[in-house]
Amino acid sequence: EADIYQTPRYLVIGTGKKITLECSQTMGHDKMYWYQQDPGMELHLIHYSYGVNSTEKGDLSSESTVSRIRTEHFPLTLESARPSHTSQYLCASGKGGYNEQFFGPGTRLTVL
Amino acid sequence: SQQGEEDPQALSIQEGENATMNCSYKTSINNLQWYRQNSGRGLVHLILIRSNEREKHSGRLRVTLDTSKKSSSLLITASRAADTASYFCATDVNSGNTPLVFGKGTRLSVIA
């Protein structure tokens, strides 16, 4: 089991609320990622970071933002949640030249 | 555009049978990886095959890679009900300098 944690695991909120999804890893990995995934569907990369103070947008256009102030911590923030944000959000970290990724358990978000 | 495409999208077999999933990709790769995702969970890394390798084994898993055809296959032998999950291939196209590109996945159901 990978040492990567996500909180909360489940979240139900109303439209317009600001939320932050937490992701932490204890493996000292430089690389961290956020994916959005609808149930049974493909993964969409929304943000990634290859080190402290370095963040990049992924392939999926997203209204979320991320920060990487510490190696182990990579939070995702939605300033104003909408029903279209309802999905599962997966955080991952990676190491080395082979680019193997370790995933957290996910946060299932429902916006009413 | 999607780099990896798994085939079939869904597969249903009886316990004890072998399951074969295929992955095709479009550009040259450094390595190709297979991941498993149980329902509602994060992905788990199964096996990695480098571009200069043709076949790799890990327990009941056998992965092949044909770079001339830009394709890979994952074989699970003597399947069990616990193998029921989605399986994703992911390609590393830039030696870890850019994120992995995941396919859309194959949903495997193993019926006891």
Image (cartoon, coloured by chain):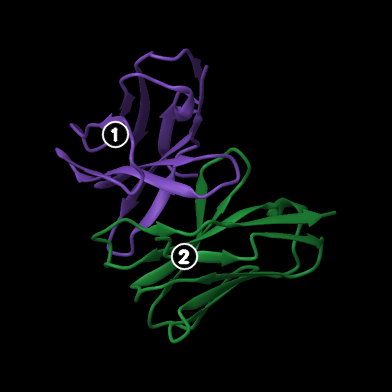
Residue underneath mark 2: B4
Quick one: label 1, few (<14), some, or many (20+) residues within 10 Å?
Answer: many
Instruction: Tell me the purple chain.
Output: A
Chain letter of mark 2 equals B
- Lateral position of residue B72 relative to residue A82, left or right: right
- Give the residue displayed 42% in from the left and 48% down from the top: A102
| Closer to the camera in the image, B75 or B102 | B102
User: In green, which chain?
Assistant: B
Task: Answer above or below: position of A37 versus B108.
Answer: above
Q: Nearer the viewer, residue A3 or A97?
A: A97
Left or right of A28 in this view: A84: right
Is residue B76 depicted above or below A12 in this figure?
Answer: below
Whole-angstrom CA distance, mark 1 to mark 2, is 27 Å
The percent position of residue B68, horizontal first and vertical second, equals 44, 87
Q: Is residue A52 left or right of residue B19?
A: left
Three-letter amino acid code at disc 2?
Gly
> Where's residue A108, x and y in %?
52, 29
> Residue under circle 1?
A74
Tags 1 and 2 on a common chain: no
x and y percent of residue A8 in the render?
46, 23
Q: Amino acid at mark 1?
A: Phe
- Vertical order, B2 against A4 (above or below): below
Marks 1 and 2 in Cβ contact (< 8 Å)? no
